[in-house]
Amino acid sequence: MGARTPRCLTRPRIRTDRGGVVATVFLDWLLSFGTGLLFGRFGMATFREGRSRLASRAFRDGLLFELVLVVGIALGCYAISADWMWMYWVDPSRLAVGIQIAAFAMYLVAFVAGFLLAPELERLRRGAALWVVGGGVVLLTAVEALTWNRLLHLGTFAAGTAPRLGTALAVLLGVGLPVTLVALVVALRRLSRAGQPGPVPGHPAPADAAARA
C-alpha cells in the first residue's frame, strides 16, 4: 500500500445532499453596516446643528457609494449566481420577487444603521466607531479564513458545481473590490478634509470650555 497523503495537504471535501452546494456564511449586510459606520464617523464634520444627519454631505456621499459600488457589485454577483449570493441557504428560484427586493433593501438599512450609530459611539468614547469597524474586519477575516473552501465552492442548486460561475465572479470581484477600496479611501479622506470633526454630542467644544473656565 502506498503512503497516504496527510489530511492537512488534501483539499477539503464539500459534503451535501443539495445538489453539490453547501450553506455558508452571509457577510454582505455586515459590510454595509461597517461602511455606514465609516461614513458616519469621518463625516461628523459635515453635521450641522438642528439638521438631520441624513441631510448631511456625509450621508449623501455615503449613500451614493453604497448604491453605486456596494449594491452595484452585489447586483452583478446576483445576476451571475443568485444561489451563491444567498450562500445556498435558500433556493432563490423559489423566492418571491418582493423578498429578493427586500434582501437588497437590507443593504441600505444596514448602511443607514451604521451611519446613525457612529456618532453615538463617538459620544460614548472618541474612536469607538473605528474600534468597532476594526473588530468587524478581524471577525470577518477570521470567518472567511475558516470557511474559505465553502466560499470558493461555487455552484447552483440545479447543476451542482459550476466552474464557469467562479470565473465570472472572479473577474467581477477582482476588478470591483479594489475599485471599491480605493473609492472608499478617497471618499473618507475628502470628508475628513471638509473640516475638523465637530464636538462630540454631549461634550463642549474646546473654545466653549475655555470660555467657561
Image (tube, grey):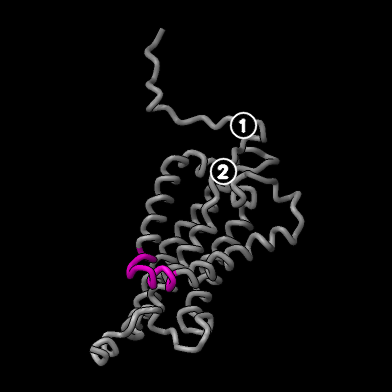
Relative vertical location of residue 122 with respect to residue 209 in this rendering, above or below: above
Local SS, label 2? loop
Q: Quadrant of the C terminus?
A: bottom left
Residue that numbered label 2 is attached to = 154
Q: Is residue 103 left or right of residue 124?
A: right
Is residue 39 shown to the viewer in this render?
no
Residue 109 lies, in percent from the top left, at: 58, 67
Q: Position of residue 105 (x, y in %)?
A: 63, 65
**Left or right, residue 12 beside residue 190:** right
Residue at 41%, 50% (x, y): give it.
139
| Disc nearer the start of the sequence (1/2) | 1
Residue lying farthest to the front in this orientation: 213
User: Closer to the camera: disc 1 or disc 2?
Assistant: 1
- Which span of residues is magenta-colored? 118-130
The quarter of the image holding the N terminus is: top left
Please name the residue shown 53% across and 57% down the image.
Answer: 28
Q: How many marks?
A: 2
Decide if residue 188 is in sight here. Answer: yes
Residue flagged by tag 2: what amino acid is it? Leu
Using residue 18 as the reference point, say whether residue 60 is left or right of it.
left
Name the magenta segment's main secondary structure: helix
Residue hosting label 1: 16
Local crowd size for mark 2, using a 10 Å CA cut-off: few (<14), some (14–19), many (≥20)? many
Q: Residue at x 48, y 75 (%)?
A: 62
Residue 119 is inside the magenta segment? yes
Depth order, front residue of 63/151: 63
Q: CA separation, marks 1 and 2?
A: 13 Å
Residue 146 image-quadrant placement: top left
| Residue 36 location (% of width, % of height) | 48, 69
